[in-house]
């Protein structure tokens, strides 16, 4: 007679049913391919990602100081269940959703061993653990790789609004990885870190951004979601949400609830500009000084001392600053505060990772 406890097999079966909305959600049935989706779309995406391999390998080699190379990718449209069969039990997932340009779900997946190997190579440290610092390193590696892709995608499509959210890495069981629902695009890379081992990285695009990017690469007009405002697309890290009643994108494309199915003639609301736009002549003037260098300073902290205290300083004197341990440092350009960040070590040099951009209002208050 059962005591009501779940067996390990039953627990595994429940975890395998978790979809991208989180633990305990129902399993979403695989959807049929979108109209017009097929081999041409897959080839367009595979060709693009393959074209970024050399630049991506070069960037990774510069970051790690070692010979790093990427091969592939092998590209396909797949589903959650199919991909999970290829993944190890523990994976490192790096979410890097496109927030504008081609908004939608975008992430990278690698095995726990691959993540540890990359972090060890970056930090020049053996037997590394995947703590917060290691996850930050993995996120930075993906950020550099993604930057190469965005530059190439901008050049090929002419879409200059492409942007992504800052990559965030987490080490989780594969069953709880937040994969897109239905059918999605997957590119599988072979990674060589120069240690005679071969690792794999999976790059995944949700159905919406995959379709929009493929259309843009082929010279076709992207869907309305791809042309959404950057701030609006970035709210959910994906495409413009369906608001219900068939009214995708704030009622601009669907029928009115309870209506006859006819499309209403909806006109966009025109709002007055809150900030003045630069005229072409002003933009040209800005271009004239783009190559002018400016002094950038990172300030650890400040303090005030009496003259007699300054004159009494000698070797070994400890000066207490106004910053607490772990508090962000100030980043100044020409002695004006523009951002805050945290101190990092890159090889044998200090660096600073920007964590906050100071708002114009804060800069004005600082000047006054």
Image (cartoon, rainbow, N blue to C red):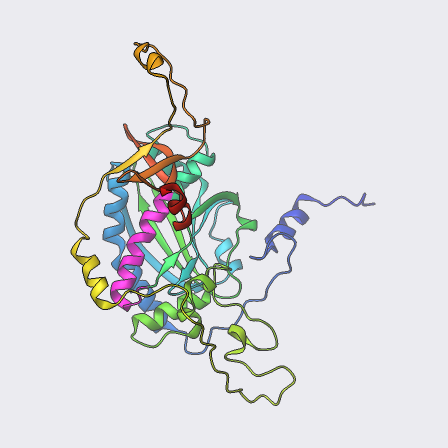
In the foreground, 225 or 105: 225
In the foreground, 210 or 326: 326
Instruction: In the rendered view, tell whether residue 252 sits above or below residue 347.
Output: below
On the rendered structure, is 22 left or right of 114? right
Question: Would residue 113 be seen by someone viewing this image from the given angle?
Answer: no
Counting from the top left corner in percent of width and height, residue 335 is at 29, 38
Q: Quadrant of residue 199?
A: top left
In the foreground, 47 or 103: 103
On the rendered structure, is 257 left or right of 306? right
On the rendered structure, is 27 left or right of 73? right
Question: Would residue 325 be seen by someone viewing this image from the given angle?
Answer: yes
Counting from the top left corner in percent of width and height, residue 72 is at 30, 55
Instruction: In the rendered view, tell whether residue 288 sits above or below residue 159.
Output: above
The C terminus lies in quadrant: top left
Say which residue appears at 34% left-offset and 63% top-offset.
161
Say which residue appears at 25% left-offset and 42% top-offset.
61
> Residue furthest toward the right?
1
The verdict on residue 368 being magenta is: no
On the rendered structure, is 293 left or right of 278? left
Instruction: In the rendered view, tell whether residue 33 sits above or below residue 166.
Output: below
Instruction: In the rendered view, tell whether residue 221 sits above or below residue 328.
Output: below
Counting from the top left corner in percent of width and height, residue 283 is at 23, 62
The N terminus lies in quadrant: top right
Question: How many numbered dots are placed on residues in this image?
Answer: 0
The verdict on residue 159 being magenta is: yes
Q: Main secondary structure of the magenta part?
A: helix
Query: Range of the magenta residues?
Result: 140-160
Counting from the top left corner in percent of width and height, residue 313 is at 32, 11
């Amino acid at each position: 007679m059962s005591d009501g406890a779940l067996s390990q097999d039953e627990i595994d079966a429940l975890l395998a049913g978790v979809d991208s909305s989180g633990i305990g959600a129902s399993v979403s049935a695989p959807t049929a391919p979108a109209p017009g989706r097929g081999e041409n779309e897959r080839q367009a995406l595979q060709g693009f990602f393959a074209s970024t391999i050399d630049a991506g390998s070069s960037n990774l080699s510069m970051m790690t100081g070692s010979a790093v190379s990427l091969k592939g990718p092998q590209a396909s449209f797949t589903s959650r269940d199919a991909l999970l069969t290829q993944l190890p039990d523990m994976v490192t997932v790096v979410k890097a959703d496109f927030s504008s340009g081609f908004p939608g779900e975008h992430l990278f997946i690698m095995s726990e061993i691959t993540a540890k190997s990359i972090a060890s190579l970056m930090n020049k440290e053996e037997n590394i653990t995947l703590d917060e610092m290691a996850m930050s390193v993995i996120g930075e590696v993906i950020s550099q790789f993604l930057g190469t892709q965005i530059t190439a995608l901008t050049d090929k499509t002419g879409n200059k609004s492409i942007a992504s959210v800052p990559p965030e890495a987490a080490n989780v069981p594969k069953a709880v990885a937040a994969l897109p629902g239905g059918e999605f695009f997957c590119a599988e890379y072979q990674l060589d870190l120069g240690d005679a081992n071969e690792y794999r990285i999976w790059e995944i695009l949700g159905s919406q951004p995959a379709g929009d990017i493929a259309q843009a690469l082929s010279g076709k007009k992207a869907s309305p979601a791809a042309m959404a405002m950057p701030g609006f697309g970035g709210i959910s890290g994906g495409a413009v949400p369906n608001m219900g009643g068939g009214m995708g994108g704030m009622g601009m494309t669907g029928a009115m609830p309870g209506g006859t199915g006819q499309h209403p003639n909806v006109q966009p609301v025109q709002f007055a500009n809150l900030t003045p736009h630069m005229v072409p002549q002003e933009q040209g003037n800005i271009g004239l000084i783009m190559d002018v260098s400016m002094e950038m300073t990172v300030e650890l902290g400040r303090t005030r001392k009496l003259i007699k205290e300054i004159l009494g300083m000698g070797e070994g004197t400890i000066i207490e600053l106004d910053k607490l341990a772990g508090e962000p440092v100030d980043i100044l350009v020409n002695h004006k505060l523009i951002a805050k960040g945290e101190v990092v070590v890159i090889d044998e040099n200090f660096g600073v990772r920007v964590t906050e951009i100071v708002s114009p209002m804060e800069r004005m208050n600082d000047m006054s």
